Amino acid sequence: MEDVMTITLPTEVKLALDSVIQEEGVSRNELISSALEEFLFFRKLRLLRDRMVTKARAQGIYTDQDVFDLVS
């Protein structure tokens, strides 16, 4: 199921979006949907990383070398 949304963009953002749509040869819907999916994925990844960094620091793990030393 798909939902319809209406958004308001500053003129310069819409112009940049239209330029990318032309360059990429995709529809506005495809580009915006893809961009939002990518944003949501990286947001989830960033939140997971933040949680893991907090747990690691609580155990004295601060660097890649610290991780390497623990698993070697």
Image (cartoon, rainbow, N blue to C red):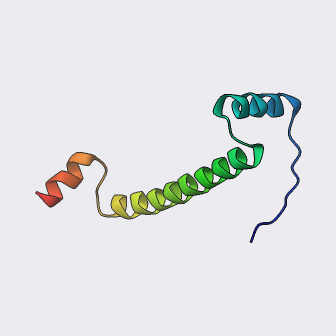
In the picture, which quadrant includes the N terminus? bottom right
72 to the left or right of 59: left
Q: Percent from the top left, x then y, of residue 15? A: 81, 28
Residue at (76, 43) in percent of width and height: 28
59 to the left or right of 42: left
Front one among 41 and 28: 28
Residue at (55, 56) in percent of width and height: 41
In the picture, which quadrant includes the C terminus? bottom left
Number of marks drawn: 0
Q: Percent from the top left, x then y, of residue 46? A: 51, 54
Front one among 30 and 41: 30
| In the depicted structure, whether residue 2 falls above or below residue 5 | below
**Residue furthest to the bottom:** 1
59 to the left or right of 30: left
**Residue furthest to the front:** 25
Residue at (69, 40) in percent of width and height: 26
Q: Percent from the top left, x then y, of residue 17? A: 75, 34
Q: Percent from the top left, x then y, of residue 31? A: 69, 44
Residue at (65, 47) in percent of width and height: 35
Which quarter of the picture shows residue 53?
bottom left
